[in-house]
Amino acid sequence: MDGEVKKAFYPNFNMIRLVAASMVIFSHAFLISEKTEANEPFVRLLGDGKLLGLWGVYVFFITSGFLVTQSAQFGSVGGFLWRRALRIYPALVVCTLLSVYVLGPFFSPLGISAYLLKSFHVKTDSAFGA
C-alpha cells in the first residue's frame, strides 16, 4: 500500500461544472426567447459582449480541462484514450440515433413515414447508381 498512488477526488468540481452549464443555458434563454441578449443580466450590468453564458463557458472548460488533465496523469496514453472514448462515444451514438430516428421524423417537412422511408439518411440502390 505504500507505493500505491491515490487519485485526488474533488467532489465540488461537478457542482462547479453544473453551475457553469446552467449559466450558459440561462444566458441562451434570453437570446432564444427575445431574439436578443440585450436583457441578459450581465449585459445590462456590464455592457455589450459581457454575457453570463460566456463566463459559464470559460469556467466549464477550465474545470473540465483540469479534470481531464488529472485523468491523463494515471496509466498509459492508450488507456487514457480508451477511457475517454468509453465516456464520450456511447452518449454520442445514443444522441445521434435519437436525433435521427425520434426527433427527425417529427420536425421534418416530409412527415413521419416519408422521412423514415425516403430520407437521405437511408441508403437506397437508386441513390448510388446501382
Image (spheres, rainbow, N blue to C red):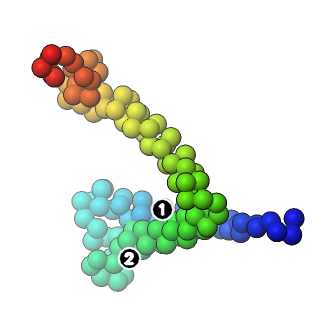
Q: CA distance from mark 2 to mark 1?
A: 16 Å
Measured along the vertical axis of the image, is residue 8 above or below residue 84? below
- In front here: 124 or 23? 124
Is residue 107 placed above or below 36 in the rendered structure? above
Q: Secondary structure at mark 1?
A: helix
Asked if the residue under mark 1 is in contact with the one under mark 2, i.e. CB atoms within 8 Å, the reply is no
The x, y position of residue 36, in whole percent, is 25, 65
Residue 65 in the image, given as x and y percentages of width and height? 51, 68
Q: Residue furthest left?
A: 129
Residue drawn at point x = 35 percent, y = 70 percent = 40
Would residue 117 be visible to someone looking at this image?
yes
Which amino acid, by three-letter code, is at mark 2?
Phe
**On residue 21, which mark appears?**
1
- Left-right relation of 60 to 14: left
Q: Amino acid at mark 1?
A: Ala
What residue is shown with label 2? 42
The residue carrying pointer 2 sits among few (fewer than 14), some (14 to 19) or many (20 or more) residues within 10 Å by Cα, namely: some
Name the residue at 65% across, 63% down: 74
Q: Give the crowd class for mark 1: few <14, some 14-19, many >=20 residues within 10 Å.
A: some
Relative to 43, does residue 113 appear above or below in the rendering?
Answer: above
Reading the chain from its start, which is encountered first: label 2 or label 1? 1
* Quarter where residue 96 is shown: top left
Q: Nearer the viewer, mark 2 or mark 1?
A: 1
